[in-house]
Amino acid sequence: MSANVYPVPDDIAKGALIDKAKYDAMYKQSVEDPEGFWGEHGKRIDWIKPYKTVKNVSYDAKDLYIKWYEDGTLNVAANCLDRHLEKRGDQTAIIFEGDDPNVSEHITYRDLYERTCRFANALKSMGVAKGDRVVIYLPMIPEAAVAMLACARIGAIHSIVFGGFSPEALAGRVEDCGAKVVITSDEGLRGGRSVPLKRNADEALSHPGVKSVEKMVVVKHTGKDVAWNDARDVWYHEVCAAASTDCPPTEVNAEDPLFVLYTSGSTGKPKGVLHTSGGYLVYASMTHEYVFDYHEGDIYWCTADVGWVTGHSYIVYGPLANGATTLMFEGVPSYPDASRFWQVCEKHKVNIFYTAPTAIRALMREGESFVNKADLSSLRILGSVGEPINPEAWEWYYEHVGKKNCPIVDTWWQTETGGILITPLPGATDLKPGSATLPFFGVQPALLDNEGKELTGATDGNLVIKDSWPGQMRTVYGDHERFIQTYFSTFKNVYTTGDGARRDDDGYYWITGRVDDVINVSGHRMGTAEVESALVAHSKVAEAAVVGVPHDIKGQGIYAYVTLNAGEEPTDELRAELVKWVRKEIGPIASPDFIQWSPGLPKTRSGKIMRRILRKIAANEYDQLGDTSTLADPGVVDDLIDNRQNR
Ligand code: 6R9
């Protein structure tokens, strides 16, 4: 745990939407009177038929239901577009920044509205109706947002598959949700290299299990020649040109599905996480406004991909519902060089910047000179999401990117939660590097022991949420039983997050990682994140991943994979030095038993380290690695096996 505390800066507190007193009062109301609180805040979006019932929830595994605003009706796209036209039709809704630094485009709310209406009509003409599933397999281009909003406009359910996924992964998802239409592009572009999306989609649709797809819509992006199936394929620009810009929004019920998003669990095939319309939009827009202290006119940039939940809630739905200007970036942080993020911040005068710890560590490794090249004076708020941010990376982000005057909101949440649950609010929360701090309004975290007993005070335990919030997932698509089993069976009458956390004396939460990543060394519980954080705090270490390894005496030993900073020599002396260092940082109990030099770590395409693979290699069970198809670079695995330490 880092000892540093960063109080709310005075100028931020003064201008912020929520200060300390307001946070306390609103939080109190939100948990004492959820109906009153969410009844009031539900009005932040436009309803066609206003709701009378706010909340109707039972967490009882035998009779489970989660409903918010259940008798209200609305249209999500109309909330993101139509209602802004009068006041901000000419304001930029989306800034597109291409992979190529010379390509960018401003799209106004009116333009986005018209594009969405045209494409919605085009989808209708292909027979897509309310409740039908549409798979979106696109790069980070404005058409991805248009496609999402067009589905929402006609009540169709979108399911985005990240453009980095393989044909196999795409096929599995298309089959599971029974999509009628797949939307893709000729190619994607990332870091100057093209990705054959249309070819992948063709291959996916040729899988024998995929029988539901009637049409494939193809966006011409790079202009590359692609194979064509006349009976099935249509060009996006052609169907849009033929369609009208007049498309009345379809009225949907608050509990009608908005999207399905597949996410991997600890077991089995990916789950289709289903989110509905009303509660999700209320929660995404409200968290976007308060967590990022969003003010009218701010330029907001979330670097996620729309293929992940962060892109859904915090590139598209939250910001657009709030009438914000949201930046969509097609490229990668390292292209053309490691200053790209900062160049983009300067170019578009970004005020709010939201990214992932893995990106920060990678850029930190390249040194400050890349940050210092850019004018970052427009930045006001920084954010982090996706994994625990180690204090070392936090401090670097704070000092070199934020110049010590931008609060960092470390936002903890999950695909399942729809929006941010535990987070600082810039004007209300003193920061501690590495802590996601305090719950958002309406969120009641609790820590349970393994028997399900609630723990009080400063302690660590299984992180659960005691009551529902409007953005919560409603079911696993096509498998409600799995939903109940996964989230409501381990512990009774709570939502089980699968994460562990520690609460400190100030009531701050420190996420320690997935509970299956907790290791037990001689009867002492230790979060792998804690050891990683210690290793990364060493000046020669760029990144570290720690797993438990079977140990005859201790039960579990500690196995560390370490990536050194560019130019550092991997020597036995340095190994010994790192062991000493960790003993010093945490204590002898945390001494790594093995340190393996690893030039690369196995990561998913969203940047999460796949510890399952690291555990198998450490345990010498590298013949049982399981599915490695979701790895960004499967090649790193061979190197790790060749150089394993525990032979
Ligand atoms: C939004 C997102 C969810 C898992 C979650 C946790 C980890 C996310 C975090 C964090 C510590 C944070 N996680 N944010 N851990 N601090 N600020 O990432 O969704 O892809 O479903 O991942 O990511 O372990 O359970 P998702």
Image (cartoon, helix red, strand yellow):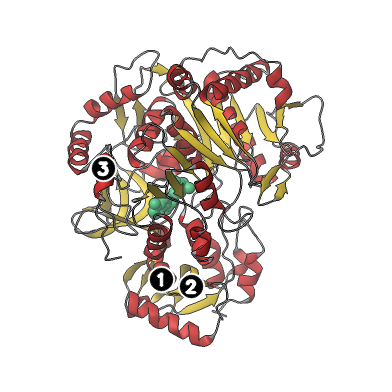
- Mark 2 belongs to which amino acid? Val
**Mark 2 lies on residue:** 541
At label 1, the amino acid type is: Ala
Label 3 element class: loop
Quick check: 109 above or below 348? above
Is disc 1 placed on a helix, strand or loop? Answer: loop
Query: In this picture, is 482 found above or below 250?
Result: below
Can you tell which mark lies on residue 444? 3
Which residue is painted at 60% across and 64% down in the image? 624
Q: CA distance from mark 1 to mark 3?
A: 32 Å
The answer to whether any part of residue 611 appears in the image is no
Left or right: residue 260 versus residue 120 is left
| Sequence-first tag of 2 and 3 | 3
> Within 10 angstroms of label 3, few (less than 14), some, or many (20 or more) residues?
many
Residue labelled with disc 1: 537
Q: Position of residue 72 (x, y in %)?
A: 37, 17
Circle nearer the N terminus (1, 3) = 3
Task: Give the structural element (helix, strand or loop) at label 2.
Answer: strand
- Are discs 2 and 1 less than 8 Å apart at CB? yes
Q: State the CA–CA distance, disc 2 to disc 1.
A: 7 Å
Q: Is residue 216 visible?
A: yes
Q: Characterize the local packing of mark 2: few (<14), some (14-19) or many (20 or more) Cα atoms within 10 angstroms.
A: some
Q: Position of residue 625 (x, y in %)?
A: 60, 62
